């Protein structure tokens, strides 16, 4: 039992040392510890241009560290963004495989490949008044796999840790598919390229003494997309500053605000808030 506790502490210590790469809006190339189980509950708040109201999307998530190279997530989505009341929209999966690791004192470099898929039951055009049309012209051409649309995505992540600073970049391709009860309209792009650049800084503790110390991380992330189909071409780049607190090396609180910096793609919403709580259980297999 004592050995198990020591091992769990060492795993937690390793997680804290690299805490500044636990990005809020993207995933790093590093994985969660092997045989660990994580639970997330995210809440995104959007200002909906087509209705003038605030849309809320709730995202429960379960994460499993299969081994040191592979991790998988299962996700659910529910919101009032495309209909007048809350509705279960569907679910998805996320898998990441780390294929390159280079370790140095107080630094490391990681590369990983990821795949994502979603199966969603939403209309492509919102119905906000029980069958009537939306209140304002709806010009959205920004599809996503995080609750709005069905599809698949894949790409590459590279992450560099340099003492208290972590930098990460992602490049991926997304193919959008028909939703369960609605076919994708012609005027939407079925293909897009996604890209991001993220930076995380460990602010507290200044000097590490115990895995029970609270960690404070600050992030800034740049998130971009380009639709590639001629019928709905367009691009945007968002900036998303974030604050993160980690308690006892197991529980984290994420707060983020995302807004558009530049772009020419008509979108449903260009501003959003994210509040998310996560709890991790280490060494589940041994327990």
Image (cartoon, rainbow, N blue to C red):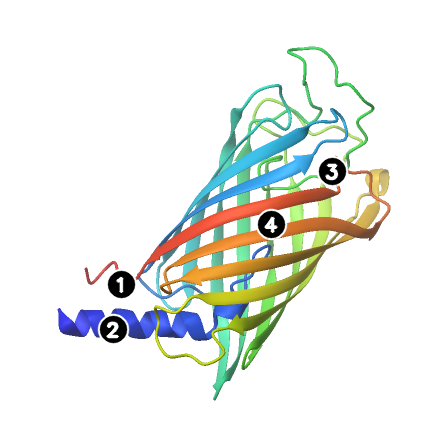
SS at mark 1? loop
- 49 lies above or below 197: above
What residue sits right under mark 4 in the picture?
153
Q: Residue at x 23, y 74 (%)?
A: 6
Whole-angstrom CA distance, mark 1 to mark 2, is 8 Å
What residue sits right under mark 2 in the picture?
7
| Left or right side of 143 for 7 | left
Q: Residue at x 72, y 45 (%)?
A: 191
Q: Earlier in the sequence, mark 2 or mark 3?
A: 2
Q: Earlier in the sequence, mark 1 or mark 4?
A: 4
SS at mark 4? strand
| Disc 2: CA contacts within 10 A as few (<14), some (14-19) or many (>=20) | some
**How many numbered discs, if any?**
4
SS at mark 3? loop
Image position, residue 127 (x, y; %): 68, 18
Residue 124: which quarter of the image? top right
Q: Earlier in the sequence, mark 3 or mark 4?
A: 4
Q: Residue at x 47, y 89 (%)?
A: 105
| Left or right side of 190 for 287 | left
Of labels 4 and 2, the one closer to you: 2
In the rendering, which numbered label is found on residue 269?
A: 3
Image position, residue 175 (x, y; %): 66, 44
What residue sits right under mark 1 in the picture?
283
Q: Nearer the viewer, residue 253 or 64?
A: 253
| Disc 1: CA contacts within 10 A as few (<14), some (14-19) or many (>=20) | some
Image quarter where the N terminus lies is bottom left
| Left or right side of 46 for 58 | left
Image position, residue 214 (x, y; %): 42, 66
Q: Earlier in the sequence, mark 1 or mark 2?
A: 2
| Disc 3: CA contacts within 10 A as few (<14), some (14-19) or many (>=20) | some
Report the residue that reaches farthest toward the bottom: 105
């Amino acid at each position: 039992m004592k050995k198990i506790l020591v091992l769990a502490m060492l795993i937690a210590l390793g997680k804290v040392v690299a805490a500044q790469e636990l990005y809020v809006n993207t995933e790093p190339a590093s994985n969660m510890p092997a045989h660990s189980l994580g639970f997330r509950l995210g809440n995104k708040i959007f200002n909906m241009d087509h209705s003038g109201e605030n849309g809320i999307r709730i995202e429960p998530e379960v994460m499993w560290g299969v081994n040191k190279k592979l991790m998988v997530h299962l996700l659910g989505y529910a919101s009032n963004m495309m209909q007048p009341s809350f509705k279960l929209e569907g679910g998805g999966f996320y898998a990441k495989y780390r294929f390159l690791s280079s370790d140095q004192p107080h630094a490391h470099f990681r590369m990983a490949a990821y795949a994502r898929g979603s199966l969603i039951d939403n209309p492509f055009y919102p119905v906000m008044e029980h069958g009537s049309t939306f209140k304002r012209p709806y010009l959205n051409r920004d599809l996503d796999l995080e609750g709005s649309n069905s599809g698949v995505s894949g790409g590459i992540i590279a992450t560099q840790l340099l003492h208290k600073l972590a930098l990460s970049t992602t490049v991926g391709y997304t193919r959008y598919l028909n939703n369960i009860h609605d076919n994708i309209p012609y005027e939407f792009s079925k293909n897009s390229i996604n890209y991001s650049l993220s930076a995380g800084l460990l602010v507290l503790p200044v000097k590490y003494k115990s895995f029970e110390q609270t960690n404070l991380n600050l992030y800034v992330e740049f998130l971009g997309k380009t639709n590639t189909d001629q019928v709905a071409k367009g691009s945007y780049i968002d900036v998303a500053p974030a604050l993160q607190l980690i308690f006892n090396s197991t529980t984290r609180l994420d707060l983020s605000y995302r807004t558009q910096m530049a772009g020419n793609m008509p979108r449903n919403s260009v501003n959003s808030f994210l509040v998310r709580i996560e709890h991790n259980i280490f060494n589940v297999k041994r327990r």
